[in-house]
Amino acid sequence: MSDTIVLEVEELEKRYRDFSLRVSFRLASGEVLGVVGPNGAGKTTLIHCVLGIVKRDRGRVRFFGLDVDQHEVEIKQRVGFFLEEAPLFRRMRASDVLKFFASFYPRWDWRLANKMIQQFELEVGKKVGELSKGMRAKLGLVTAFSHRPELVILDEPTAGLDPGMRRELVQIVRELRRDFHPTILLTSHIMADIEDLADRIAFLREGEVALIESKTQLLHRWRRLRGRCRDVRRLDPGDWVAVEHDQASGEVHVVTNRWSPALMDRVREAGLADPEVCALNLEEIYGYVIGARGREFEASPAIRTESASEWVANHRESHR
Amino acid sequence: MEREALKAVIKKYVLYDHFFRRAYLVLVAQMSAILLVFTALFIVKKLPAAYLLLISTGVWLGVGLAASLMVAGAIQREKAEGSFRTLRALPLRAETLFLGTILSGVIASILALVPPYLITTIGLIVLRGWDLMLLQIRAGWAVLLISFLFASAGLTVALCVNSPAVILNVIVGFSTLVTLLALSRTLLDLRPFSEEELLRFARFLLSLEGQALISAIVIVLSGAILYLGSRIFSRQKSYV
């Protein structure tokens, strides 16, 4: 990973009658940014706006330092994409789809494409509509990676696949990443995929980035402190992401997104006896940022998107 | 304009799309077979060659218009399936995609015209309709122009409109306009054309000057539709 910015989305705005998308983020070379969020959060709209399938109302999108409106073709030749449910041309043979894609990319590598076809056991003589969902997804990956793109945009690549195929696809993406280190922008609502692939995660909620942070930092900073407490009211909810009282065990769970060992003294002072620190997984963090407990999280002072200086600092930290 | 991208879009619609290719070949084969039967009948029964040319012109027109309609259908099908957005994500400008698709329709129309045109030519030669050969060329040119105009208008609508309901409205609106034009003489109580005026008009249409003028009008009209269509298409808010 380097500090070179491959994709810069600046105050991108897209308004619909009942929904608006407003996002800003940067993507560094070699990095994998996972965008997560529930259905309707704006993940696909974001990808469509970035790729020019949907026109944005406001904001700027720059790839490799070039403005997408002025250098569309030049930029897209360096970008691979996989759209949700791989909407490739159902009435065309898979081999014709590949020939069709190859004619748009000067750097298309047939050797790599054929290697992937063999590895994925793709039946390229079949029409796309006759292929299974998993095979269509694999074909989508061949079209996305065969020109050795510098940036790959993957929109829900594992949506609708069975767990076995999903694992296989994630493994393929991981191997492709290892082989030629592209930068990847990945959207998914399956946290396990994001956990497997992403370096940094953006949580999208109702069209806005609720939180964007490196995976390492997220897992490090988000913790649950568990212990017994005589007076729960002493734990000020404003200081924590969530304060939960487990009626069954009588324990109090305090969730923080700013974990440091010094925090132990604060919870002890607040009356939490013998606090035990537990790690949160991404699924749980997602639950607090996006899910039912989102409102509580919103009240937390830690909710934010990155500023440019923070991005550089965070990015360096995650790189280390 | 990216030439390779343009070629790829044309190939995609005319060659790679299985459904289109099969339907297209069936259409051309069926119409050619029908015309072949008619031509054989004309030859066996020694019927006047002029009638063969009249029937043939109808067949050419039908094939030419149907071919571009089929490309329009393929575009709408891709929009409904969601695969059309893949085209916009590829490295090609919206204008190139627009022009490539229109050219696909025009090329499909021209190619569809070739077999029935050749059948008519053979029929006219066998029927010794030498005096009709020039008229055949002119009729062929006229069909080509109409097909071009139809492809420009039909495919522009198919590309710029995402909803089938809007397409239906466009067709209904267009039909209403044509009906109104047809009824305008009665509605506005205009004097009907005399036989002599009609004959003079027909002669003008068949003259070189008349054909050149009408060709120019149709080409300019098609060009205007394409220019407008290209601008609308490239400024569309969504290609989904």
Image (cartoon, coloured by chain):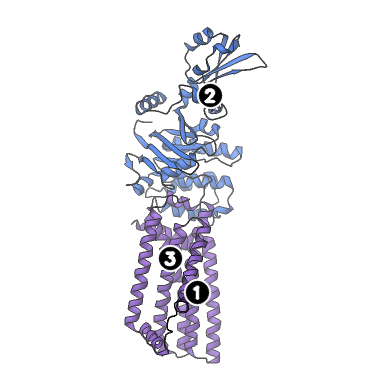
| SS state under label 1 | helix
10 Å neighbourhood of mark 2: few (<14), some, or many (≥20)? some
Marks 1, 2: nearer the viewer:
2
Q: Nearer the viewer, residue B189 or A83?
A: B189
- Provide residue A183's location: percent of width, then percent of height: 41, 36
In the rendered view, tell whether residue B156 sits above or below residue A163: below
Q: What color does chain B have in the rendering? A: purple
10 Å neighbourhood of mark 1: few (<14), some, or many (≥20)? some
Marks 2, 3: nearer the viewer:
2
| Residue carrying label 1 | B62
Q: What color does chain A have in the rendering? A: blue
Residue type, label 3 = Ala
Using the image, tell me which numbered label, if any, was put on residue B153.
3
Alpha carbon distance from label 1 to label 3 = 16 Å
Give the image quarter of residue B206.
Answer: bottom left
Alpha carbon distance from label 1 to label 2 = 67 Å
Q: Nearer the viewer, residue A160 or A149?
A: A160
Judge whether residue B95 can be spotted in this image: yes
Give the image quarter of residue B106.
Answer: bottom left
| SS state under label 3 | helix
Give the mark nearer the N terminus: 1 vs 3: 1
- Provide residue A246's location: percent of width, then percent of height: 63, 17
Residue type, label 1 = Gly
Q: Quadrant of the N terminus of chain B?
A: bottom left
Name the residue at 41% across, 40% down.
Answer: A13
Q: Nearer the viewer, residue A231 or A191?
A: A231
| Residue carrying label 2 | A296
In the rendered view, tell whether residue B37 sits above or below residue A227: below
Residue type, label 2 = Glu
Q: The numbered mark 2 sits on a residue in which chain?
A: A
